[in-house]
Image (spheres, rainbow, N blue to C red):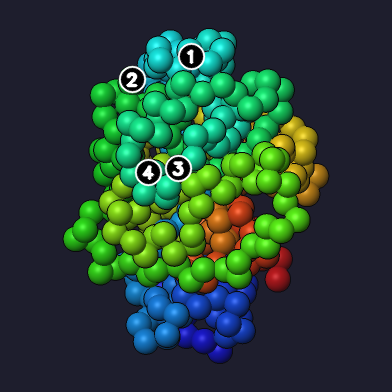
Amino acid sequence: MTDVQGTCDERFETVRVTFANSLEAGTDVGASVAVFVEGEPVVDIWGGHADEALTKPWERDTITNVWSTTKTMTFLCMLMLADQGGLDFHAPVAKYWPEFAAGGKEQVEVRHVMGHTAGLSGWTQSLEPEDLADWEKVTSLLAAQEPWWEPGSASGYHAVTQGFLIGEVVRRITGSSIGSFFASEIASPLRADFHIGLPAEEDHRVSFVIPPPPIDTADIDPEGLMFRTLTNPRVDATAPHQDWWRRAEIPAANGHGNARSVAAVQSIIAGSGEARGIRLLSSRGCDPIFEEQAKGTDLVLGVPLRFGMGYGLSNDLLPIGPRACYWGGYGGSVVVMDQETRLTVSYAMNRMESGLVGDARGVNLVMAAVMGLLGVG
């Protein structure tokens, strides 16, 4: 069996075995898995290789681009601002960002941005990938743009735009970029090795993601929301290999970390605002997460989803519990938190599958963690 490094409580041996089997089968090339209970790590394991050529081992401090799992970090930033009284999820975005009122968006609320219902899942003006590094350009375009559907009526996954929308609200309230705010107010107190905008001195630890098979867009309506959202700009899965991508703050997509750092942050949610003696939210500060913002077939992804305040919530296809939430990233990374069991499970890897928000590898690990918690298997 493939060698797996790190520590694993004997209750969660099934997690280690599941992970080792994935490495052995080649389903994973290099990856990390973390399980926290009551805010404390009970599984912190890693293995495989950090490169596609299989020449460099995945180390304890290896980090990788986790794509949309980054969004969970931005949600926590917003929850903190709301908990501190600086943000009202039910207020118009224009209260904090006056220019956003253009294009008939005077009544678009912050919760619409959080729940992917703002009607701004993409840009109307054509962009090049490198434009995502130009904060003023991409946020100004969103502020001026008209919604693509009636805000609040349905979700349409804001794959890249959500991070810029949230990030600009954070900047208007705090005066700091969301990467800086996250680093000082969340990552630093939790000692979490997660970055929105990666310093050059950390590049040596990065495992570049291994792109998935290309998506066949031939049968996708070029005028439809999916095509318009996901192809402008046309971001190749090799973007994280490029310096400009890693240096930029692209808060919906370019966070770098590993399973340990993702779980270290998101265990705050599982712990109702507290983990490892650090409290970032009041005991009620997580409650907005479970206010349903959208339920039904997502206009962009075309699959049934249920969104709370940012995070995905339990649904028929993913019954994770009434006080549980989750999100995942393009290619497979995922994090799941459950307040009832105080459980956090995270998975971060380099070999990408074609799914936008997770695949069977992450689901299998979450199931193995739940079995361990329940003493089954």
Left or right: 211 as drawn, with respect to 338: left
Residue 76, can we see it? no
- Name the residue carrying label 4: 131
- Mark 1 / mark 4, whichever is N-terminal: 1
Q: Quadrant of residue 20?
A: bottom right
> In the image, residue 245 lies at what x, y percent?
35, 54
Q: Earlier in the sequence, mark 1 or mark 3?
A: 1
Spatial separation of the CA atoms under disc 1 and disc 3? 20 Å
Image height of 251 relative to 329, above or below: above
Q: Earlier in the sequence, mark 2 or mark 4?
A: 4
So how many labels did they put on this image? 4
Say few, some or many: other residues with alpha carbon within 10 Å of mark 1 (under 14 / 14 to 19 / 20 or more): some
Looking at the image, is mark 1 or mark 2 earlier in the sequence?
A: 1
Q: Which mark, by number, is residue 102?
A: 1
**Label 2 environment density (alpha carbons within 10 Å; few <14, some 14–19, many ≥20):** some
The residue at which mark 3 appears reads as 127
Which mark is nearer the camera, 2 or 4?
Answer: 4
Q: Quadrant of the C terminus?
A: bottom right
| Mark 2: amino acid | Ile
Q: CA distance from mark 1 to mark 4?
A: 22 Å
Query: What is the quadrant of residue 64 in the picture?
Result: bottom left
| 302 relative to 168 in the view: left or right | right
Q: Is residue 296 above or below residue 371?
A: above
In the rendered structure, which disc, 3 or 2, sits on the residue that comes first in sequence?
3
Q: CA distance from mark 2 to mark 4?
A: 24 Å
- Looking at this view, is 48 or 115 the one in front? 115
Q: Which part of the image, by quadrant, shows the N terminus?
A: bottom right
Q: Amino acid at mark 1?
A: Ala
Q: Are marks 3 and 2 in contact (CB under 8 Å)?
A: no
Residue, disc 2: 173
Q: Are marks 3 and 4 in contact (CB under 8 Å)?
A: yes
